[in-house]
Image (cartoon, rainbow, N blue to C red):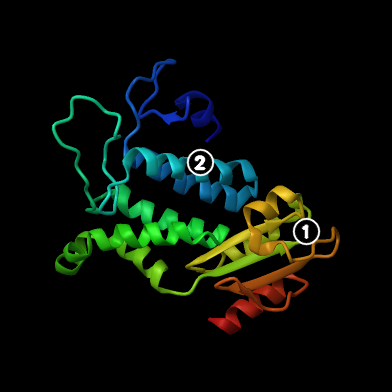
Amino acid sequence: VTFIKTEIFESGRLFHSYRNGSKNIPGFLDDYCFLIAALLDVYSITFELNWMNWAIDLTEIVEKLFAANDGGYYFTQAEEENLIARSKSPFDNAMPSGNSVMVRNLVRLAEFTGNEKYRHRAWDTCNSFGSHITKYPQAYSEMLIGLDYLLGSSRQIVISGVEKQDISRTLQKLNERFLPRTVIIFNDGEPETQNLFPHIADKPTEKGKPQFYLCENFTCQFPVASVDELVELIESKS
């Protein structure tokens, strides 16, 4: 992702391809959506805020360049010239459609940040294809996963008081389990982190004193002091 940001992203725009320093094809919806999904995954592994911030910035760019007034997203940018028509494909084939990937991106952003505008936009996208999904659900496998995320309750796991370099064991333990509709947030107590994730601002953080919170729809249980206790808590709620 560092290479993409330094070489294939320029002046607030993502390009579709790169070769020997040349990039001249504007990015399509799929390019942006899959990159946003990857950035959310990278944040969930590294907890480096720059990747979360870039995912949010790219989401705003997608809204500006690709959003349709009736919900969903066009495949090509609004700034593209010489287009007779702009297509808006929702079908999930061997590769999921950009619209479907964007639904999950928006839900995940809502669960990370608590900003409901992302969830509303995800609903708008699903609703715009609602009649087609009802008739041909087998053609919308990825979008149905996003719809499941919208309909189900969300969980947030907040980790505090752990040195970032020591967090790998926690992630290993959590990643051994299937945790749908769940996001993991690292609370380092820094103002930038708490501004980005305002719902964790009241969670105390003290280095050397690990605390793990399991939250559902942003309502948190009392913290536990170890990842093993956290896993037990998760399993008791499953």
Q: Give the distance between the C-alpha atoms of the residues marked 2 and 1, in whole angstroms.
A: 28 Å
- The label on residue 30 is none
- Residue depicted at x 60% and y 61%: 184
- Residue depicted at x 59% and y 67%: 156
Q: Is residue 127 left or right of residue 43?
A: left
Crowd rating for badge 1 (residues with CA inside 10 Å; few <14, some 14–19, many 20+): many
Q: Is residue 220 left or right of residue 111?
A: right
Q: Position of residue 114 (x, y in %)?
A: 55, 62
Looking at the rendered structure, the secondary structure element under dot 2 is: helix
Crowd rating for badge 2 (residues with CA inside 10 Å; few <14, some 14–19, many 20+): few
> Which callout, 2 or 1, points to the residue nearer the camera?
2
- Residue depicted at x 31% and y 51%: 99
Return the residue at label 2: 57
Q: Position of residue 234 (x, y in %)?
A: 60, 77
As drawn, which residue projects farthest toward the front?
A: 69
Sequence-wise, the earlier of marks 2 and 1 is: 2
- Residue depicted at x 58% and y 80%: 235
Q: Quadrant of residue 232?
A: bottom right
Return the residue at label 1: 162
Residue 142 visible somewhere in the drawing:
no
Residue type highlighted by circle 2: Asp
Residue 167 visible somewhere in the drawing:
yes
Looking at the rendered structure, the secondary structure element under dot 1 is: loop
As drawn, which residue projects farthest toward the bottom?
A: 236
